[in-house]
Image (cartoon, helix red, strand yellow):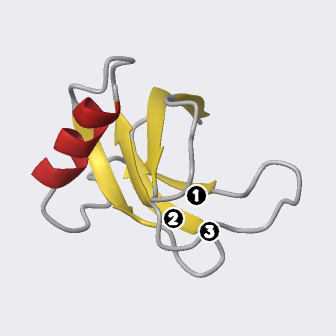
Amino acid sequence: MGQRLDAKVSAMSGSSPGAGANEFTYTLTETGSGDPIPDADVWATTDSNGSVVVASGRTDQNGIITFYLDSGTVYIWRQKSGYNFANPDTEIVP
């Protein structure tokens, strides 16, 4: 699975916050301490397999990234060296 995620991230060209109608802010923090995780690659897909990427970027120093997504269910994928994330994180965009 790690190789598949690496391929997805490698295929992304920079930051693409999305073209949806709603501003959606996602905060990435460490489990337990709640400390922010800066400089993590994060992307949103419309399917749980991760095939249809609709937005991507990197968290800021506070572990925050903002996407522009349409309402509905999205799947958030996270990757950063030294961390193991349970991908995807299912989120609802209002």
Q: Nearer the viewer, residue 17 or 56?
A: 56
Residue ID at (30%, 50%): 55
Q: Nearer the viewer, residue 83 or 44?
A: 83
Point out residue 72 in the picture as x, y percentages from the top left corner: 48, 26
Mark 2 or 3, which is nearer the eye?
3
Residue under pointer 1 = 25
Please report contact status of discs 2 and 1: CB closer than 8 Å, yes or no: yes
Q: Name the secondary structure under disc 3.
A: loop
Q: Residue furthest bottom?
A: 61
Judge left or right: residue 30 versus residue 85.
right
Residue under pointer 2 = 65
Task: State the CA–CA distance, disc 2 to disc 1.
Answer: 6 Å
Please report contact status of discs 3 and 1: CB closer than 8 Å, yes or no: no
> Where, by quadrant of the figure, is residue 68 drawn?
bottom left
Residue under pointer 3 = 63
- Disc 2 marks a residue whose amino acid type is Ile
Residue ID at (45%, 30%): 74
- Disc 3 marks a residue whose amino acid type is Gly
Q: Earlier in the sequence, mark 3 or mark 1?
A: 1
Point out residue 21 in the picture as x, y percentages from the top left corner: 38, 48
Task: State the CA–CA distance, disc 3 to disc 1.
Answer: 10 Å
Using the image, determine if residue 57 lies above or below residue 89.
below
Quadrant containing the C terminus in the rendered view: top right
Q: Name the secondary structure under disc 2.
A: strand
Number of other residues with Cα within 10 Å of mark 3, as a class: few under 14, some 14 to 19, many 20 or more: some
Number of other residues with Cα within 10 Å of mark 1, as a class: few under 14, some 14 to 19, many 20 or more: few
Quadrant containing the N terminus in the rendered view: top left
Residue ID at (57%, 40%): 85
Mark 3 or 1, which is nearer the eye?
3
